[in-house]
Image: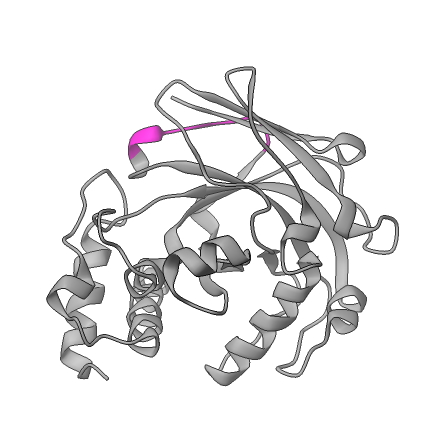
């Protein structure tokens, strides 16, 4: 485990590049013995700084929910990050591209909770505690150099969360078989990716139950009103300034944004 002073110093580096396109050098290259728990400690200090600056938490994200991505990163479970109020956008938003670094887009379902979830939550508890599920886009970014990046770097960097775009038609979880929700992801009117939500751990609610347990072990919990991004069911799609992104979820509607 890293000492508290080192964790504070890494969080300071990340806080200094929270907006804009500036990157910091690989953390694990400088601290090769850094662990996943160290990375969550860094993320926690960084998040506390944002709270102190007047931001507030509106939810959490889950990443690395597919076996392919887990194999690529050498980790056998998902990771998570925090969603703050200033990076939550509505469908149709025009977003400042230069606010982010290494911008990519993923297609996800967002669970909006109407009850708290305890550490021992099951998939059935998740469904019972969800007011509705809504289509979403996750804006991925990296404030750390990409080449050679590991899961420890990514978790420290708030699990690569840049922003969230919410849209489409909200549905109650018992109104649709969430496993078979599908989406087509377009960039500038060209289909780039497609997928089905069952690719997220067999059922997108599985990741939310995992997150409730993980946060409980870290001393926090998922609360009523939170928005939980359940994990991507497409590969990340790179975008550039000027690109328009459109995700068609069929019966659940669509989500779109443009990067200026």
Whether residue 142 is situated above or below residue 117 in the rendered picture: above
Residue 147 vs residue 98, the one in the foreground = 147
> Would you identify the image quadrant in which residue 165 lies?
top right
Residue 226 place in picture, x, y as percent: 61, 61
Residue 105, magenta (yes or no): no
Instruction: Pick the quarter of the image with the N terminus.
Output: bottom left
Residue 68 place in picture, x, y as percent: 50, 53
**Who's the residue at 29% across and 76% down the image?**
35
**Who's the residue at 33% across and 60% down the image?**
50
**Who's the residue at 79% across and 71% down the image?**
124
Instruction: Pick the quarter of the image with the C terminus.
Output: top left
**Who's the residue at 23% across and 57% down the image?**
15
What's the magenta region?
91-98
The answer to whether any part of residue 56 appears in the image is no
Residue 139 place in picture, x, y as percent: 45, 41
Whether residue 234 is situated above or below residue 97 in the rendered picture: below
Q: How many marks?
A: 0
Residue lying farthest top?
189
> Would you identify the image quadrant in which residue 130 lies?
bottom right
Whether residue 259 is situated above or below residue 133 in the rendered picture: above
Horizontal side, residue 65 vs residue 161: left or right: right
Horizontal side, residue 1 vs residue 232: left or right: left
The answer to whether any part of residue 257 appears in the image is yes
Residue 117 place in picture, x, y as percent: 67, 75
Residue 109 vs residue 11, the one in the foreground = 109
């Amino acid at each position: 485990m890293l000492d508290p002073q080192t964790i504070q110093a890494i969080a300071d580096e990340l806080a200094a590049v929270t907006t804009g396109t500036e990157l910091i050098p690989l953390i694990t290259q400088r601290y090769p013995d850094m662990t996943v728990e160290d990375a969550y400690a860094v993320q926690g200090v960084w998040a506390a700084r944002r709270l102190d600056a007047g931001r507030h938490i509106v939810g959490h994200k889950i990443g690395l929910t597919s076996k392919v991505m887990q194999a690529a990163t050498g980790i056998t479970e998902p990771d998570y990050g925090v969603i703050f109020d200033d990076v939550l956008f509505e469908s149709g938003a025009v977003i400042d591209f230069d606010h982010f670094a290494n911008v990519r887009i993923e297609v996800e379902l967002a669970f909006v909770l109407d009850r708290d979830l305890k550490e021992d939550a099951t998939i059935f508890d998740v469904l019972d505690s969800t007011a509705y599920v809504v289509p979403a886009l996750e804006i991925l970014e990296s404030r750390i150099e990409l080449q050679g990046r590991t899961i420890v770097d990514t978790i420290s960097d708030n699990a690569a969360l840049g922003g969230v775009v919410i849209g489409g038609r909200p549905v109650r979880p018992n109104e649709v078989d969430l496993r078979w929700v599908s989406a087509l992801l377009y960039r500038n009117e060209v289909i780039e990716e497609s997928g089905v939500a069952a690719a997220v751990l067999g059922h997108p609610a599985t990741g939310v139950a995992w997150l409730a347990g993980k946060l409980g072990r870290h001393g926090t919990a998922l609360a009523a009103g939170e928005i939980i991004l359940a994990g991507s069911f497409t590969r990340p799609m790179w975008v550039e300034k000027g690109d328009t992104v459109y995700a068609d979820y069929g019966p659940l509607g669509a989500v779109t944004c443009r990067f200026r």
